[in-house]
Image: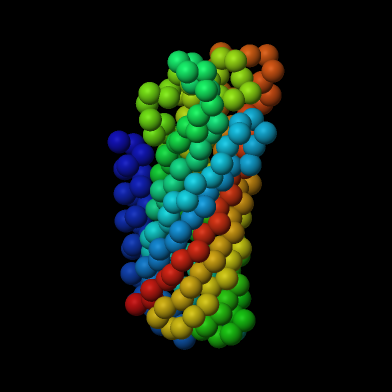
Amino acid sequence: MKYLSLLALLLVTSTTIYAQSYKSSGNYNRIGLQGKVALVDIDTKNFDIQGETGFLAGFTTRGNVYNNWGMVYGIDFLSTAVTVQTTSLDQLTSEDTQYNIIGAQLNLLLSYNLIANHLAVDIGPALLINSKMKLDNSSQSTNIVSGYTTLTASDIQEISRVNGFGVIGLTGGFEHVRLTLQYQYGFTNILNNLNNQNLVIDNNTRDFKGNASIIAAGVVFYL
């Protein structure tokens, strides 16, 4: 409930900002709706983990600031998954164990127009407020994570809930429709919360450390 309330607050706040921005005067100032296919991965030595394809969708605003410089800010809702290699205790076989992640991402990007109103480079920070890594199949909760002897699939769900990203991307097209391509790299440790869980694990375990990354491509429709 607390998590859903926070998402609702972010949505209302961002929508208010968009509405005010749309009414302001300027040479170029657009509110947009965007949808992106997103590949989310976690770079870590702790687990054998692979990213899955998900999506980002939400609101964005693009406006001029000075000469060829502009500002882009918005909110996206994220739904994606990752797969961790585990071993089933029942069958003693290796299994792909999928975890689902949802969240909301706020971004504030500086934009430089390569071609005015048609092609721009965007760069800046983003903040992701995400859920835990929720097991897709609860019957795999007792599976042992590959590389460990006692760490189970259910043990590693409670990842860090607030994570910062650096974003760089290209946005190009026409006044009302543009294509966008982004690369995002997480500069915070998305697995850090696991270090505070007092997990009962074998002595070979190192500190949990991982950095998330997102490759996203999609389309923006400006009003």
Q: State left or right for residue 76 relative to residue 124.
A: left
Image point (42%, 39%), residue name: 100
Residue 60 picture location, percent across and down: 42, 66
Image point (53%, 48%), residue name: 40
Work out which quarter of the rendered image holds the N terminus and state it.
Answer: top left
Q: Is residue 210 above or below residue 222?
A: above
- The colour scheme used to paint the residues is rainbow
In the rendered picture of this protein, how many numbered marks are placed on residues? 0
Image point (43%, 22%), residue name: 141
Q: Is residue 107 visible to the viewer in this orientation of the structure? A: yes
The front one of 195 and 6 is 195
Q: State left or right for residue 42 relative to residue 178.
A: right
The front one of 197 and 200 is 200
Q: Is residue 78 above or below residue 109?
A: above
Residue 214 picture location, percent across and down: 55, 53
Residue 159 picture location, percent across and down: 51, 33
Q: Is residue 203 above or below residue 9?
A: above
Residue 43 picture location, percent across and down: 63, 42
Q: Is residue 21 visible to the viewer in this orientation of the structure? A: no
Image point (64%, 37%), residue name: 44
Work out which quarter of the rendered image holds the C terminus and state it.
Answer: bottom left
